[in-house]
Amino acid sequence: MSKYLLEIGCEELPYKFIAPAIEQLKNGFSKFLKENNIKYSDINVLATPRRLAVIISDLAEKQDDETKVLRGPIKNVAYDENGNLTKAGEGFLKKNGINLEDAYLEDNYLHAKVEIKGKETCLVLQENIPSLILKMQGSHFMRWDNFDEKFQRPIRWIVSIMDDKEVPLQIINVKSGKVSRGHRFANPNTVEINHPDEYVEKLKSVNVLVNQEERKAEIVRQAKAEADKAGATPRYSEDLLEEVTQLCEWPVAVTCEFDEEFLTIPEEVTVTVMAVHQRYFALYKDGKLTNKFITITNYIGNEFENIKAGNLRVIKARLDDAVFFFKEDTKKPLADYVEGLKGMTFQKGMGTIYDKTQRIIELSKVISKELAQESDTIIRTAQLCKADLCTSLVFEFTELQGYIGSDYARISGEDKAVVDGIKEHYFPLNADSELAKTIEGQVVGIADKIDTVCAVFADGRKPTGSSDPLGVRRAALGIIKTIISNNLKLDLNKLIEKTLELLPVKKDCIHEVQEFFTQRLIIFLNDEYKKDILEACTSKNPLSDLSDYVSRVKAVSEMNSTELSESANRIIRILKQPVHEQIKQDLFKHESEGMLFDAVNKVSETSDYNLYLDELKSLVPAITMFFDNVLVLDEDIAVKNNRLSMLTILKEKFEHLCDFSKIQY
């Protein structure tokens, strides 16, 4: 078994390309090796801004030999009336290099077995790797020089070796060798790789941490060490850490600082400038933001004064702008910005942001009334929730909408519940972020998001696999998580209907919106529960009470009774159409009918679904006895309908929990 190394050296790759490139290379090589019958144990993809590397372990030295059975023409086409091969038959043998004695008839067709000797793996790699690399996908691929082929950035060098031998390749105009390049400012800048096993360590000798996970861990270690010197704690998101990891080959953490006067502006602004615009790690001490930050440099050396001065110059300019916008914005109260929303379009045909705000106010009234949570702070939150969109600071830092509105509301003297609600109505910001804690944030957030979802559907722009107008999937998920997490008794069906009524464009799409929410609900819960159970529990419209739906899903998931399921499915198979007639006991012909009738009447529908399951299980003996002794489809129409009516009631009892026919065992 061998080990193979491929390194594609490039000009600096965009950081957004690196993660998908790693996935593409892993999947691409895995598929390629399997299709070519080449055995291996592991594919490891390493990447930095200047290189993509693939290391394949325990690689077979040749393809497995293969026996293929080829089917040729049908008998009357392959042979003439004298039993001799026709031109078609001869062509089949010649094309596949088959001797006549190796051909045979089977199932009225000409067949032949062909022994295919496996090629040397080196040859297969040489023949296929260039096209495999050039098939990679990504945005903003480019051409260079006068070549027709495209790649993310110009390719400058290639390393291709199996064990200690070179596997010669050429991609576009670059031929492979054994020489790799180190960090752009390393001295020496090149290194010879004589075996894949020495690749990682030899690159370290030229200041490249090629393993992205090792690089990430080193960044975390250095950031903590720098923070410890200042008695602080670094704070950064996983996305920021991932981005910084893909921007450097040799990370070095440097602590910088800015003037303390910038701590007077909203914390979110300062942190956003550092994280989003400059990719700095903010430092906190005793839970409060400090005027120090960490920057991760792609640097070789120990002279940091120029680095510190340059970063301070950049962040000061950004924060000076923020201070100016902040002072200008706060010259008037937040409420005065509401009028400006009349000049901002929400989406074509759906009015302005001001119109959307009025719908949010109306929907917030409906929601708070249904929740018995009516209050002036909810309505005030709805009135001001979008006002900060007219401020200069949000225009500059759009990702801070809500946070800025909340801070400006505080400065304007608004109630604390309103201050928190304005910020929280955007929550959750993504799949993993926090949910609104205040009732103001919950109610106004639901109203805002459902207006967006319904507006998109009413405009005929429902989401597809590649398109998600206005992030309606995230909006629907936010509504679902908010309702379930806070156990809000809210009927989404009524709310969807009311929202569609308020929109300026009238379109009958209520069922589309309901189905969309139902599918998002199933997807959201699919990590915890089986999909067949989730779908089975939609027998009752889940949107009327999401918490009730989750309770039913949980109970059915914990159910362990094949007898109950078999009984339910037996009823479903017999009852093609429901029959709703009054059950007449005088039409009972067997005691089992009366026993089942009495047992059914004792089952009372309840939201305690574990108790309800026990009640359904108690029906199984009566159901079994009924089917063992009674022919449901009796010749007497009255008797038949009487029995079908009882089964209809019984089926509805089961459907109070779920549709058992959808559950897979």
Image (tube, grey):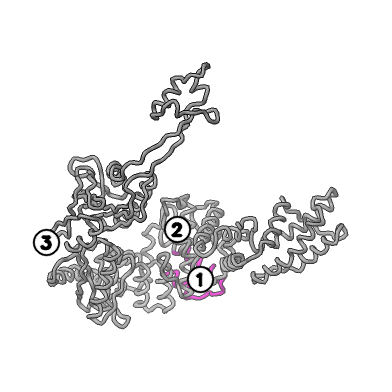
Q: Position of residue 180 (x, y in %)?
A: 18, 54
**Label 2–label 3 contact, CB within 8 A:** no
User: Is label 2 in a helix, a strand or a loop?
Assistant: helix
Separation (CA) of disc 1 from disc 2: 20 Å
Separation (CA) of disc 2 from disc 3: 52 Å
Separation (CA) of disc 1 from disc 3: 57 Å
Residue 382 forms part of the magenta stretch: yes
Foreground tag (2 vs 3): 3
Q: Position of residue 655 (x, y in %)?
A: 67, 60
User: Is label 1 in a helix, a strand or a loop?
Assistant: helix
Name the residue beneath numbered marker 1: 485
Q: What residue range appears in magenta?
A: 357-384
Q: Residues within 10 Å of mark 1 (few under 14, many from 20)?
A: few
Nearer to us in this view, 388 or 206:
206
Name the residue beneath numbered marker 3: 187
Q: Amino acid at mark 2?
A: Val
Residue 426 figure quarter: bottom left
Nearer to us in this view, 258 or 39:
39
Q: Position of residue 144 (x, y in %)?
A: 20, 44
Q: Residues within 10 Å of mark 2 (few under 14, many from 20)?
A: many
Residue 371 figure quarter: bottom right
Q: Which mark is residue 472?
A: 2
Q: Earlier in the sequence, mark 1 or mark 3?
A: 3
Q: In this view, which residue lies farthest toward the front?
A: 101
Foreground tag (1 vs 3): 3
